Every structure is written in C-alpha cells, then in structure tokens.
Image (cartoon, rainbow, N blue to C red):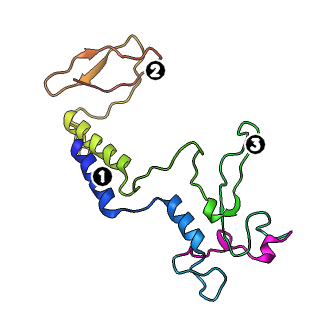
C-alpha cells in the first residue's frame, strides 16, 4: 500500500495538472478561444459552445436576454450549477448562466478544492492497491472462480462470521449490534 501512495503522488507532481475550477476560471478571465474575429478573443480562453459557454453581449445582458444580471458585456458566461442556495432547507439552486470566473464544481462552499493536482486519482490508486492486498490475503483471484464457490447471505447479530486466514478459519463474533451485519474479517 505505501508504494501506491508514493507512485500516485510522484505522478501528480510529474504531470502537474490543474484542477477544473482553476482552469475554467483562468480561461474565463482570458475570454473565448473559438472566434478570433469575435469579442473577447484570446487563444487561451474557453471554447464557445452555444447554450453552455457564451460571450455576454449588450443584447444578451438586456431584459429578455439570456444573460440578464449575469455579468458585463465581453465577459464569458457558463451554464452551470451556481452553488448552494442561501437557505438549502427551503430553497433550490437550479442551473443557470453565470460568469465563468465565478464557476464552482458541484460541491459545498465549505469544501475547499485541494491544492494539489487531481491527476492521477489518489482515491482510485489507493482503492486498487487495497483490492490487490485483500485479494492476496484472502487467496482470491478476481480473474478465476473461487474454489469455495459463490456464497451469498446475511449475517445477523448474535451469529458468528468466519474470518478468512491463510492458516486457519475460525469463528469471530460480529462487531456491530444492528442487524443485518455483513463482515469480512482478516486475521
């Protein structure tokens, strides 16, 4: 497991890829990159996609336009989730046009985007490493049928579950008191 942590973090630093929130905001400040003759053009801007990424114009910012109250002409608007409402218990927050520089991923305001690269996924790396360890400890090859066959069922409190061990199998009482309890215990 520790080697998977090191490998993931070495790759994160090697690729140094930014998070989407940083890039969408950065590119939104630059402008649009689709039309060199259009307003707010910059080669590092966001590519325009009708209905999703658009330039705010005087016409679209006027009453009846799709960007009324969104931003100023020349700014980039994205059609996205605007964040949590002020009172989540009684309000909703449907998708709408908003300034690209204000874009947030679908997450709570109190959740900070990590200050390290998202690629490669640490969660995926660690999950796969853990699956390999569990497979090795339980003597199960995920690519071949188990010699014990497939077994399904429920275990309830006061029943004993079997641990999986290289040397022996022995009964272990479940640690949770709420039925049903399913557990895989290693010794």
Task: Tell me which residue sits at (42%, 21%) in the image.
Answer: 181
- Label 1, secondary structure: give it: helix
**Which quadrant is home to the N terminus?**
top left
The label number, if any, that marks residue 9 in the structure image: 1
The label number, if any, that marks residue 180 in the structure image: 2
Does residue 5 appear to the left or right of 48 in the view shown?
left
- Label 3, secondary structure: give it: loop
Of badges 3 and 1, the one in the foreground is 1
Q: As drawn, which residue projects farthest toward the top?
A: 158
- Between disc 3 and disc 1, whose residue precedes? 1
Q: Residues within 10 Å of mark 3 (few under 14, many from 20)?
A: few
Q: As drawn, which residue projects farthest toward the right?
A: 63
Task: Tell me which residue sits at (63%, 59%) in the image.
Answer: 102
- Label 2, secondary structure: give it: loop
- Give the CA distance from mark 1 to mark 2: 39 Å
- Give the CA distance from mark 3 to mark 1: 40 Å
Residue on which the image places disc 3 = 91
For the residues bearing labels 3 and 1, Cβ distance under 8 angstroms: no
Q: As drawn, which residue projects farthest toward the left?
A: 167
Of badges 1 and 2, the one in the foreground is 1
- Between disc 1 and disc 2, whose residue precedes? 1
Task: Tell me which residue sits at (15%, 28%) in the image.
Answer: 166
- The quadrant in which residue 174 appears is top left
| Residue 170, visible in the rendered structure | yes
| Residue 143, visible in the rendered structure | no
Does residue 52 appear to the left or right of 175 in the view shown?
right
Vertically, is 87 above or below 167? below
Task: Look at the image and give the residue range highlighted in magenta.
Answer: 45-63
Give how far across and how far down residue 103 sits, in percent.
61, 59
Give how far across and how far down residue 23 sits, in percent.
50, 65
């Amino acid at each position: 497991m520790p080697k998977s942590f090191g490998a993931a973090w070495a790759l994160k630093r090697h690729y140094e890829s930014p998070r989407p929130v940083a890039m969408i905001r950065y590119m939104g400040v630059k402008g649009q990159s689709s039309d060199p003759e259009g307003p707010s053009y910059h080669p590092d801007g966001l590519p325009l996609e009708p209905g999703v990424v658009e330039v705010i114009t005087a016409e679209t910012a006027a009453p009846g336009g799709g960007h009324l109250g969104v931003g100023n002409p020349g700014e980039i608007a994205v059609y996205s989730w605007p964040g949590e409402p002020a009172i989540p218990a009684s309000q909703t927050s449907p998708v709408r046009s908003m300034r690209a520089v204000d874009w947030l991923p679908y997450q709570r305001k109190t959740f900070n985007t990590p200050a390290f690269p998202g690629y490669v996924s640490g969660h995926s790396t660690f999950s796969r490493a853990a699956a390999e360890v569990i497979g090795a400890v339980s003597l199960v090859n995920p690519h071949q049928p188990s010699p014990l066959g497939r077994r399904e069922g429920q275990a309830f409190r006061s029943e004993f579950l079997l641990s999986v061990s290289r040397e022996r199998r022995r009964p272990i009482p479940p640690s949770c008191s709420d039925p049903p309890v399913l557990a895989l215990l290693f010794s």
